[in-house]
Structure formats: C-alpha cells, structure tokens
Image: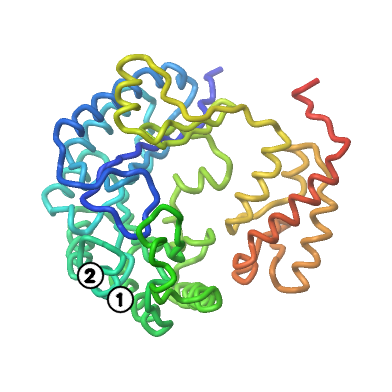
Amino acid sequence: MEQQLKSLGIYIHIPFCRSKCEYCDFYSLPGGKNRKAMEDYAQAVMLHLKEAAQRAAEYEVDTVYFGGGTPSFFGEEGLRRLLDEIDRRFILRPDAEVTFEANPDSVSAPALRRLRKAGFNRISIGVQSDRDEQLRALGRPHSFQQAREAVAAAKDAGFDNLSLDLMYGLPGQSRDQWAGTLQSIIKLRPAHISCYGLRVEEGTPLYEYKDCANLPDDDAQADMYLYAVDTLESYGYRQYEISNFSREGFESKHNLRYWLGGEYLGFGPAAASDFAGKRFTYQRDLQGYVEGIFGGAPVLSECESIPLRERAGEYLMLRLRTRYGIEAKEYHRMFRMDFAPLEEILEQLHKARYATKENGRWRLTAQGFLLSNQIILALQEAQRESAAFWVDPDAL
C-alpha cells in the first residue's frame, strides 16, 4: 500500500529591507542592496534546504512562505532560485500555496510576471494606511499611490490570491481616518486583508518616543478593531483569525498551519520550526547563520522537545485565535484530558457573549477576541488544575 505523505510548510526568512520601519522588531538589515551578502545568503539557504530535505522524505510541501524583512527587496531572481531549490529538494505539491511578502516600492510589473510564471501564486503587500502622512510617521518607504500601482501590477501579472496588510492605532489616527483606510482598501478588491493593531515594542525607534507620539489608547484601538470586523464582514470578508479576513476560499493556508498546529520548517536567521516533535529557532545573526551553514557550526538559538501537556496548552492558545476553535472529542482524542472544566468556563463566556458554540465547536466572538489573552490564560489554568494527576502516555 502506498505510504501517505505528511503535510509540511516551509518558511524562508529574507532578512533584507530598504529601511527599518519605526515599529518593526523583526530581524532585518536595512540599507542599500549588498549583492555579496545577498548572494552568500542565497547559497547558504540552498545548502540548508538540501540538508534538511533528507529528513523530510515522508512529507510533501503544500505551503511555502517568503517573509521578512522585505522579500521583494531581495529581488525576483533570488526568490525564484530559492523556490526552484525547494522544488528540487522536497516533494512540492503542484497546487501548493506559494506566498511572498512585498512592499509597494520594491515591485515591478515585469518582476511580478516572472515570479508568477515561476510558481509564486500568492502575494502579501504591506500597505498599512492610505494616508501618506501616516506612512511617513511609520517610516514606510512608499506612498499610497505606489500601493495602488503595486496592486494593479500584481493583478495584471495573474495574482488572484492577493493579500493587503493594514495597521490601526497609528500616531494621530482617528476612527474616521481608519474607516477611510478600510474603504480605500476594499475598493482595491483584494482576496485577503490583514488588520493589525500597532504594538510598541521595546528596542524599536517608536518605543523611544511613544509617550509623545499621540497614539490612540486601548479603548480607541478596540473600537477600530470592532469597526473593521463589522465593515469587512459586510463586504464579504469573513474573519477567520483574530487579525485576518478573507473572501471564501482565500484564507492563508500557511498561516493556518501555525494556528492549527501543523508542522513547518523555517530557514534563515530568526526563523522558527516545529518539526518531528521538536521546536527550534535559528540565531538572529545573518553572518553567524551563513558561516554556520557553510562551516557546520551550531546555528540554533534554541531547541526543545514539546511534551504533550504543553501541546495541550498551545491547542487552546492557537486554535482560539481562529474561527475553527476547539472541540471536546478532538481535545480528548489528542490529549486524553477532560474537557469538562474548560466547557464550564466557555459556558460562562457564552452567557457574556464572548464565546459561541457552533456544530459542537467552541470559538470566541469578536468581543471575545479583544479579551483573548485573559480568556486563554483562564482556560489554561483550568487545564493545569484538571491535569494535576494526568500522566503523559508517551512517558510511560
């Protein structure tokens, strides 16, 4: 009987960008194009892919995601070479979802056509706002007109699966301005829209002047979020995860892999993996990563086996971010744990309209998503108490 292949996602981190945004805490190296650094990096990733593929013979790759940094700044030739190497080394499904992130200022119509022909079929463009003064305040290297032009070029190149990223809670942003941004984006008719609340992360430039940045408070951000949920729903964009909305059939398959507990391999500095029962992350150091791959030196910053009890906690944390939610029989089958203590809390949340039950599955409402951190912590505490005498069957 033919062996059933397991599903695998691949993430490639591209740590290059033109400039660092004021709010960004992702690992990236801003500045002009360093051709040698980019070529050395491409060679290192290709070698790493070759080595990793030997451990993935029982898997087929059905999602590939190039994130960053700014993959489009890396260039279409480099992206095509890396995708070709994935296709060469792994079992890549013909219908795999293949995504790359792009900034409006670093794409061109000819490059987009070549990428589409090479097998890329999904593009995620960072737009963030339709107001140029807000884009400048964020340190974004593009205008909204460039975003419009990038969207038109992507559609002309055949990218029907087009996602646009937005941010709310920007310096000086009003609810009316946010409403205007949503309308501007809806007019562009993307298949997918991501809406992220601005977070001020320590170590970013924004963190240094946050107190005088005129940032909307938590209540104002919550109002913007709920407005987005209602507005996008009315235009046919269903919320399937806290920050993500799509037309039917255009959910991000790769990101759903993270939220639903699928396996994935990451490549590049700061990239994370969850593969064969282990979770590991590569060091946030481009030179260290490149030298480690070529020289066989350690490149991991952390590596651990994840016990089943911890996976149970992650099941709650990740799946309750999505509209798919959690279910008693599934929970018991996966973890051999009692769902009743969790259901008791969920019933209380249902009365408060923070959770709902559909076809036997519990999920959070839009109001519940706003309190998801507190809700998940309460559920995990109940889980820990109910598991006090639970024994991991794998440990016997």
Q: In screen coordinates, is 98 left or right of 382?
A: left
Residue 291 badge? none
| Residue annotated with mark 2 | 144
- Which sits in the foreground, 318 or 85? 318
Q: Does residue 47 lie above or below 255 as drawn? A: above
Q: What is the quadrant of the N terminus in the image?
A: top right
For image coordinates 46% across by 18% down, the residue present is 55
- Which residue is farthest bottom? 176
Res 247 visible: no
* x and y percentages locating residue 114 in the rendered image: 16, 43
Q: Quadrant of residue 145?
A: bottom left
Give me the C-alpha separation between circle 1 and circle 2.
10 Å
For image coordinates 25% across by 55% down, the residue present is 103
Q: What is the quadrant of the C terminus in the image?
A: top right
* x and y percentages locating residue 286 in the rendered image: 31, 33
Secondary structure category for the residue under label 1: helix
Q: Does residue 179 lie above or below 386 as drawn? A: below
| Residue annotated with mark 1 | 184
The reply to whether discs 1 and 2 touch (Cβ–Cβ < 8 Å) is: yes
Q: Quadrant of residue 322?
A: bottom right
- Which sits in the foreground, 167 or 98? 167
For image coordinates 65% across by 55% down, the residue present is 325
Mark 1 is surrounded, within 10 Å at the Cα level, by few (under 14), some (14 to 19) or many (20 or more) other residues, namely some
For image coordinates 32% across by 57% down, the residue present is 162
- Which sits in the foreground, 290 or 46? 290
Sequence-wise, the earlier of marks 1 and 2 is 2
**Amino acid type of the residue that numbered disc 1 sits on in the rendered structure:** Ser
Secondary structure category for the residue under label 2: helix
Q: In screen coordinates, is 371 left or right of 201?
A: right
* x and y percentages locating residue 360 in the rendered image: 73, 57
**Amino acid type of the residue that numbered disc 2 sits on in the rendered structure:** Phe
